[in-house]
Image (tube, coloured by chain):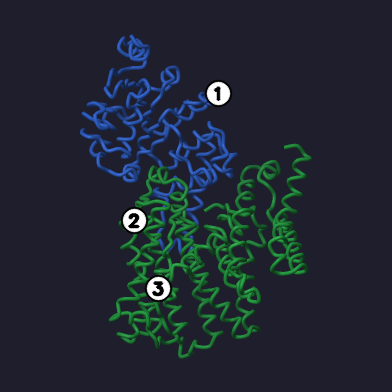
Amino acid sequence: MIGSSILSISNLSLMFGGLKALDSVDIDMKKGEVLCIIGPNGAGKTTLFNCITGFLRPTSGNIVYDGGTELTGKKPYQIAGCGIYRSFQNLALFNQLSVLENMLIGGLKRKDLSYGILDAMLATPTFKSVEARLRQEALEILRFTGIVEKSGRKAGELSYGERKLLELARGLITKPKLFLLDEPAAGLNPTEKAELVTVIRRIREQEINVVLIEHDMRFVSDIANWIVVLDYGKKLAEGLPDDVKKNRAVIEAYLGT
Amino acid sequence: MSARAKVRAALRSYIVPPLWMFAIAMPIMGLLKSMVSAGLLVAGLILYRTLKGPKSIGAVRRGGYQEAVARYMHGQLPGYLRRYGPALVLAVSIVLPLFMNNYDIDVFTSALFYTMLALALNLLVGNIGLLNLGYIAFYGIGAYTYAILHAMLGLGFWDAVLPGGVMAAVVSLVIAIPTLRLKGDYLAIVTLGFGEIVRIVFNNWDSLTNGPNGIMGIPRPSLLGLQLSTGIRFFYLTLAFVIVEVYVLYRIDRSRLGRYALAINENEQASEMVGINTYRVKAIYFMLSAFFGGVAGVLFASKQMFVSPDSFTFIESVYVLAMVILGGMGNIAGVIAGAFTLVVLPEMLREFVLYRMLIFALLLITMMLFRPEGLLGRRAYHDR
């Protein structure tokens, strides 16, 4: 599997007025990798995610997805339509809706689970079977992430860890090719972190490419096989987890000189 | 909360609202009537609590998560009421007019008109969360489209139904395209202005709309050679329109489009992230809502046999919005109840005509205090 690129970012820069939030960043992610982006606060990690998913428009540079699709200039929903899903640091769930409804909404754009206007108006067998399949798949994924018992509860009533799992589950039902996770482990206790590692590993097994932003180095070395370090919007270093941990520049950026 | 505090809170919830109601009603309705209505409120509260069904936690303990989901989602009303309720309401509304006098039928028909409007406005306000304060403009555009098509081309009612709706939808798109990036209050202000502009155009475009004098001589519809001119026949025609509208809206609610709206109403950013083109869905909802308003307008013109700008003032928009809010945003049954309450109640209170607006205001304030989610609450919390 490892070989061609799923995501290649070249010379990406973003200016906020006079501030360079991202400064000529190059990242090349091969298919099958779990890429982890680390860096001190304000290094531009989330900004990078915002550029990839279309919430911010980069000042210059290119983001090419899956060997040819140019992502810069596309709107968030179009990028999502290409098969990229992103979780937010501060979560973006439908809090007043049930866990199951959150999942059903996640599955709305699936091409293999669609029906026409007439099907919807007349509640035809096609409509019913698609709805049933969607529901079944939603429950399966919820089971897989371990929150199926909560499927009738409002998303906003779940614990923080459960909500993070729900955001992952909702991502899975969109069947993404590229899964961006913004600090998935932040604020979780050790047990929840262990659960999360299992879920991410399983996501990997489904041949979904994973990029994550993380601070917790132990968590990172558990799952990542390539690390990019950002600092002041620049790429400071990249490499295998063990090499990056020993890199002098990285240690300085984190601990100060 | 301690057990004692719980009991106290529960008792308070049965006693305080009826006391309020009594205090409000006393000076207007007199001692006896207001005591009776306070008593009715207590009975209603008890009935409501009983019907609400078991809470989800208890259900989880009894029957596992799947049943819990089912129960929680259908928990607002017991199954038989959900299943047979609509048929019952329909049967009553078909049979009841046979025993009513012409005046009552007229009130009933007018309630159906407002039901059509409130349901269509609910698409915007309740389902997707866009506030429209100039909604009545689409009603007016539908009515005028029929009037003008008849005056100029001699088109009859059935030929004008679709053009009326489509015309309203097209005009709505003109306003929707530049304004849908606005949110909340800003959108409300723009739509308010739009509603006024449309009315002023009706008032001043003399060559087309005949200005403040309006257009007369609009024919009543006929169906298969049967003139639908009497009150009761027109009532059944209106009822048929309402049924079609309710069916379409019900299906939309339960289809993908309805889920898009639900998602956008709840969290726009998250909707974009799962791939929903929020701008497009909003525009579609704007057009759908306007379309139904326009169709209702065609029907309205044929009932009045006359259109003039006076029928489409700002206060009418507010009135329709109040029905949506009173009945319960996003809840089809609730909105119907809201429309009927606000049309029928003032008729019943005719003897207190001086106090009508006062009672109306108090009713809305009381609702906001005790039941901000509306009579039947925000959409039933079911799977869709």
Nearest to the eye among marks 3 and 1: give it. Answer: 3
B42 is higher (above) or lower (below) than B267: below
Q: CA distance from mark 3 to mark 1?
A: 62 Å
Q: Which residue is mark 2?
A: B179
Q: CA distance from mark 3 to mark 2?
A: 21 Å
Nearest to the eye among marks 1 and 2: give it. Answer: 2
B221 is higher (above) or lower (below) than B74: below
Crowding at mark 2 (Cα within 10 Å: few <14, some 14-19, many 20+): some
- Secondary structure beneath dot 3 equals helix
Image location (x, y in percent) of residue B66? 61, 45
Image location (x, y in percent) of residue A157? 57, 39
What residue do we see at 33% from left, 62% from top?
B173
Q: Are marks 1 and 2 on the same chain?
A: no
Q: Which residue is mark 1?
A: A191
- Colour green maps to chain: B
Res. A69 in view: no
Quadrant position of residue B269: top left
Crowding at mark 3 (Cα within 10 Å: few <14, some 14-19, many 20+): many
The chain holding disc 3 is B
Between residues A136 and B196, which one lies in front from this camera angle? B196
Amino acid carrying mark 2 in the image: Thr
